[in-house]
Amino acid sequence: MTKMFDLTGKVAIVTGGNGGIGLGMAQGLAQAGAAVAVVGRNAAKNQAAVDGLKKLGGKAIAIEADVTDEAACRKLVADTVEALGRLDILVNNAGMNIRKQPQDYTLKEWQEVMRTNLDSAFMMSQAAYPHMKKAGGGKIICIGSMTTIFGAPFVAPYSASKGAIVQMARSMATAWAKDNIQVNAVLPGFIDTDLTKGARRDVPGLSDKVVARTPAGRWGVPPDLAGTAVYLASAASDF
Ligand code: NDP
């Protein structure tokens, strides 16, 4: 049974793996035996995450990159394969939000959210595909949101990006199943991270509302996503 979730010898890239949900997922993957490349723009945060992952016993490397840049996406995938030998798992987790009423966004702000949350996942998946195909298969995990399904007054571009990323994942899943690449999307509930600290600051009463509407009666924490990542990165989810 445990073999089904074993990631020994596998190599993962986690975009936004230096904090929040990405770090929770990276820790799960490392605990299951994967070597992890942590991608983020903040070099100090990347290094701290890598130091922590190494303490879990795994190999880990830090890659300072902005995933809204296509050339950077291609380079970081190539650098990971060069440093760690292969690529089996990609977690498209990097994301951000700008909270405003729809009428108040500039086009630049709309595009910043879409580029960070959606375009990056497309570019990273494209860059990863030939390496996974070569390895005989792979796993791509995209991060949606409750706003994939529901709307809210302050998330027009965010919810658009999170709706789209799930449809992109479904399309890639059908295209790449023949290559033994499984593409899935996770739609987390409310998780306590830097992103949602900002939301609690901007949206009065949000914290209490989340607790009231969450059956578990609490905010999620990043380690809550570790098992989900291991399942979707392992042989347990091959079909
Ligand atoms: P955090 O703000 O804690 O983490 C965001 C991560 O993304 C950071 O590691 C950040 O690193 C990285 N990142 C952002 N922009 C870029 C960029 N341009 N290039 C490279 N890395 C980037 O957020 P969360 O952990 O909360 O969110 C992670 C994902 O989960 C996001 O996609 C988010 O939309 C989604 N999500 C979050 C939920 C929640 O309740 N927290 C619920 C549902 C979905 P750095 O700044 O160093 O670049």
Image (cartoon, rainbow, N blue to C red):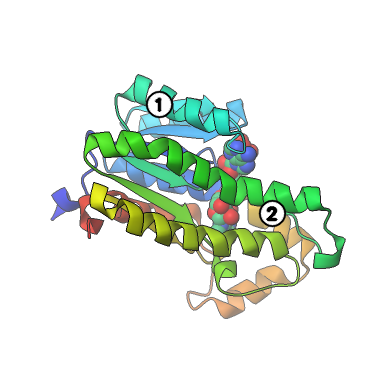
**Quarter of the rendering occupied by the C terminus:** bottom left
Residue at x 82% of width, y 58% of height: 105
Residue at x 51% of width, y 46% of height: 121
Residues at marks 1 and 2 touching, judged by CB atoms closer than 8 Å: no
Residue at x 80% of width, y 62% of height: 100
Q: Which quadrant holds residue 55?
A: top left
Q: Is residue 63 above or below residue 169?
A: above
Pointer 1: what residue?
A: 80
The image position of residue 231, as x and y in percent, is: 29, 55
Q: CA distance from mark 1 to mark 2?
A: 27 Å
Determine whether the residue tagged by mark 2 lies in a helix, strand or loop. loop
- Towards the viewer: 51 or 162: 162
147 left or right, relative to 57: right
- Towards the viewer: 103 or 179: 179
Q: Disc 2 beta carbon < 8 A from ligand 1? A: yes
Task: Confirm whether residue 51 shows in the render.
Answer: no
Pointer 2: what residue?
A: 97
184 left or right, relative to 66: left
Task: Confirm whether residue 25 shows in the render.
Answer: yes
Q: Which quadrant holds residue 156?
A: bottom right
